[in-house]
Amino acid sequence: MAISHVCAQVNPYQYSISKTAEGKNGAVSSAHPLASMVGCEILKAGGNAFDAAIATQLALAVVYPGAGNIGGGGFLVAHTKKGKTITIDYREKAPAASSRNMYLDQNGNPLLEMSQNGHLASGVPGTVAGLFKSHPYGKLSFDKLIQPAIDLAEKGFAITAAEARSLNGSKSAFIKYNTIPPVFVKSTSWKEGDTLIQTELAATLKRIQQEGAKGFYEGETARLIFEEMKRGKGNVSLDDLKNYQAVERPAISFDYKGYTIIGMPMPSSGGLLMQQMMKMIESRNIASMGFHTPASVQLMIEVERRAYADRAEFMGDQDFVRVPVKTLSSKKYLEKRMSDFIPGKATSSDVVKPGNINPESEETTHLSVADAEGNVVSVTTTLNGGYGSKTVVAGAGFLLNNEMDDFSVKPGVPNMFGAVGKEANAIAPGKRMLSSMTPTVVLKNKKPFLVVGTPGGTTIPTSVFQTLVNILEFNQSPLDAVNLPKFHHQWLPDQVAIENDFPSTVQDALSKMGYSFQKRNQIGRTEVIKINWQGKKIKNIEAVADKRGDDHAAAY
Ligand code: DON
């Protein structure tokens, strides 16, 4: 495995993938080599972690169109060199014209095709507003941060084998969900090394470069989005775009055995689920049970089950509903929650309506960034499913999200990730749909120690949970913590999802306890940065990129 000690200069036509990187001055780990390299170059050019996160996200919007985006939304969790914790919510919002039952037919049956594909599936995009909200924490001009993305879109870049497969696999969807065929559709098949040029996207990025957030939310880009909506009977309006605001929110922050774990509050369930799960295992000495033993895996499954049951019932956008966060995270409540846990025996989920998880859709993306000054930034951003709604804004060259499916379209009806919800996550105009995204920062002795996150829909919190437990309790290296097989339970459906290489001996032992299983090709694509300190100085920064995709770590 290649270990890069330098942050290589970006050559968009020839590049290789590195899964680990180490440096003293900064590191970026993201889903694509070109995006990580762009971020690293920005660090080298004097930018800080916020600058690098912005440039990396914009590059991902070009080189990783399946999930990188300007037509979606995301969350940023950061900790600054001055000790300040920041979270930025740039989650999409339901358009003003949306309504609670908009995805139900006359008989009240769900119309999931409409919440998951095409124009009506899109929430109002938040990404560009989020980038500008985080920019004041950076040091370089936005102009400079967006230029690499413009170059990549305008001059093109060589696509990877995985990207070629993915574009070919989505060809019929691109044709179906677009009134004007986008650049991703061509007559012959895509193959590794083909150059993807996105002229219209470059023009959109230039409007953002020249006009700031208005270059997206107003003027020509907004007009193109609105025209696209009219053609495809979507309902994002010019006012929706103009009114969109990203929001800074107070982080979820809790102590775990002396570490401070910082996560995203509502409308992401990620931070609270993490707090619930970590706190439910804290007193149970999981380290003594050992990694991937029936006992430790069972304990983790059972805390996952309990946390996800709470997610379905209580969690949603706190701007619209009251979420009992204090109770759900209190010691007393969590102790009570675990009072029916029986080691060696599966607890049963009350089966309301078992969900069908769509294993094809693993297309959100995470980036972890650290700089030499001690700033760390953890960002997860998404279009929701792979290529979002599959609808490209004609003339503007970017994909729109299908985030509306993250709402509960009807109580108890599973979304594309099998997640069920109720009132708390019902659709309302201007409301943000509940997310599972879990960008996370861990502090040790008040200094940044880990930057973690992953895509994976509802498997996101459980993957971050396992990664943290692997490092903090089982003393694993970040590389092992990321790459060793993962498992996942989300209350409903009442089954444990496991990766194909999950140890069969553990599976057999758990089957005997009453668990059933569903195999998955992969769970998540986790990016971890670990910062090692020597007193008040950074000794080195280790970056790890998940083995499961084109993910790439860069450092210098
Ligand atoms: O916000 C959420 O929870 C989802 N929209 C995330 C989707 C996702 O992670 C897709 N695949 N990896």
Image (spheres, helix red, strand yellow):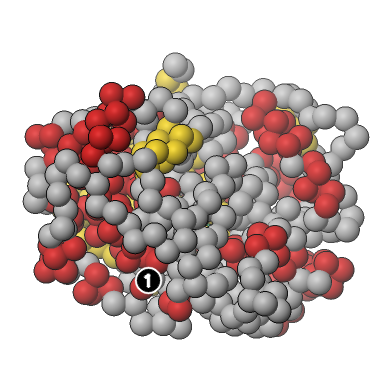
- Secondary element under disc 1, as helix, strand or loop, is helix
Residue in the image at 14% along x and 44% along y? 343
In this rendering, position of residue 238 left or right of residue 140: right
Instruction: Quadrant for residue 340, please give it.
Output: bottom left
Q: Nearer the viewer, residue 44 or 240?
A: 240
Which residue type carries mark 1? Glu
Instruction: Quadrant for residue 370, please give it.
Output: top left
Q: Is residue 200 visible?
A: no
The number of numbered discs placed on residues in the rendered structure image is 1
Counting from the top left corner in percent of width and height, residue 102 is at 66, 77
Residue in the image at 37% along x and 71% along y? 313
Residue in the image at 71% along x and 40% along y? 152
Counting from the top left corner in percent of width and height, residue 189 is at 82, 29
Q: Nearer the viewer, residue 13 or 475?
A: 475
Quadrant for the N terminus in the image: top left
Q: Residues within 10 Å of mark 1 (few under 14, many from 20)?
A: some
Instruction: Quadrant for residue 62, please give it.
Output: top right
When the figure is inspected, residue 248 is found, relative to residue 396, above or below; the finding is below
Counting from the top left corner in percent of width and height, residue 424 is at 43, 77
Quadrant for the C terminus in the image: top left
In this rendering, position of residue 220 left or right of residue 214: right
Residue in the image at 46% along x and 17% along y? 2
Residue highlighted by disc 1: 313
In this rendering, position of residue 426 left or right of residue 293: right
When the figure is inspected, residue 11 is found, relative to residue 334, above or below; the finding is above
Q: Is residue 111 visible?
A: yes
In this rendering, position of residue 474 left or right of residue 314: left
Counting from the top left corner in percent of width and height, residue 262 is at 28, 58
Q: Nearer the viewer, residue 122 or 58?
A: 122
